[in-house]
Image (tube, helix red, strand yellow):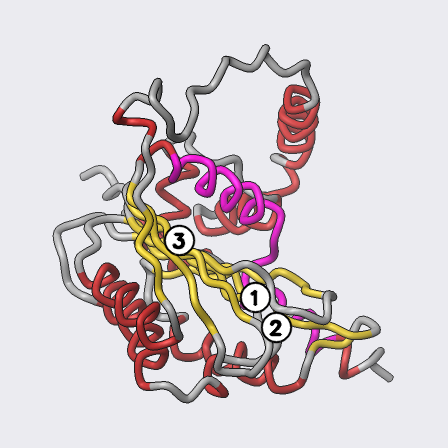
Amino acid sequence: MADKKPTEEAIARKMGCCGRSTVSAMLNGRRFPTWEHTAAFARALDADPSKLRKQWVEASRQIEEASKGFPSPRAQLPPISGPQAMGEAMLAAHWYRNNREFYEAACARIQQAHSEIRVTYTRRYPPTQYTTRASADYFTAILDWASEDSDDERSVRRIIGVPERDGQPDSDMFSWARQHYEDSKHILTYEANVLRWTAAADGLNMALIDDSVVFLAFSGGPRQKLNGLSIENPTFMTYFAAYFDQLWAALQPLGTYLSEVERRADGPSA
């Protein structure tokens, strides 16, 4: 009897550096894999990664060259508002005045998600140092949604900005990232990549839920201060989704980042 075809989940487990959603995207041509993912994929299927290196480099070069081509002329955009504005051009925003309002609304939408959640966390302090109940519920809801048994093809991708100074990660944020990796590495529908963050300020954080709603968070001043807005519009979503995917493709998986930092801290072997 012929060997059974391995499932995407089985391949992801053998790779050990990504989840099922990444394997699916690689196999279906939706995402060009990093060399790390390509090599891990080959090893998972008992193939020699070195035999794929030349093809991967060539494909990567062609993609890079294509991205530098001349942009197409920009179409004239309709006004956002005004007497000539079409109804579909109008954007309705929901405004959240504080930490609690923002996280409660985002948490409620997370629990209603169907297929995909993309989130960023780029702040100077780890989530455990923001003590509001609403923010804690929000972070729990994302992992719970990813872990839930469902017939849907679920995917959560999170970009974690780890503050660095002189090449060294913030110790509190690094400790949280390590614990977060241990808490989430068994969830095949959840992946996290790391953005090395050198600015002495929070970044603009966002949550993209399915293909419908964008949450944007703005923080500053006191540690707990945060407000923001959400907009439900598929076209508006595409701009932030493209930005997120551009960042994601350039970043290291969380597990790889942790290993690299810890190896560097140990220093050269004797």
Q: Looking at the picture, which amino acid does disc 1 mark?
A: Thr
User: Is residue 16 visible from the viewing direction of this image?
Assistant: no
- As for residue 12 lying within the magenta part, the answer is no
Residue 62 sits in quarter: top right
Taking the image as shown, residue 198 lies to the left or right of residue 17, namely right
Residue at numbered disc 1: 122
Residue 134's x, y, as percent? 31, 79
- As for residue 258 lying within the magenta part, the answer is yes
Q: Looking at the picture, which amino acid does disc 3 mark?
A: Arg
Taking the image as shown, residue 79 lies to the left or right of residue 84, namely right
Distance Cα–Cα, label 1 vs label 2: 17 Å
Distance Cα–Cα, label 3 vs label 1: 13 Å
Q: Main secondary structure of the magenta part?
A: helix
Taking the image as shown, residue 25 lies to the left or right of residue 54, namely left
Residue that appears at 18% across and 39% down: 1
Residue 22's x, y, as percent? 41, 47
- Mark 2 crowdedness (10 Å alpha carbons): few <14, some 14-19, many ≥20: some
Judge whether 96 appears above or below 25 on screen: below
Q: Nearer the viewer, residue 118 or 228?
A: 228
Say what secondary structure mark 2 lies in. Answer: helix
Q: Earlier in the sequence, mark 3 or mark 2?
A: 3
Distance Cα–Cα, label 3 vs label 2: 21 Å
Q: Earlier in the sequence, mark 1 or mark 2?
A: 1
Say what secondary structure mark 3 lies in. Answer: strand
Residue at numbered disc 2: 258
Residue that appears at 42% across and 58% down: 119
What range is drawn magenta here? 236-263
User: Is residue 111 visible from the viewing direction of this image?
Assistant: yes
Residue at numbered disc 3: 118
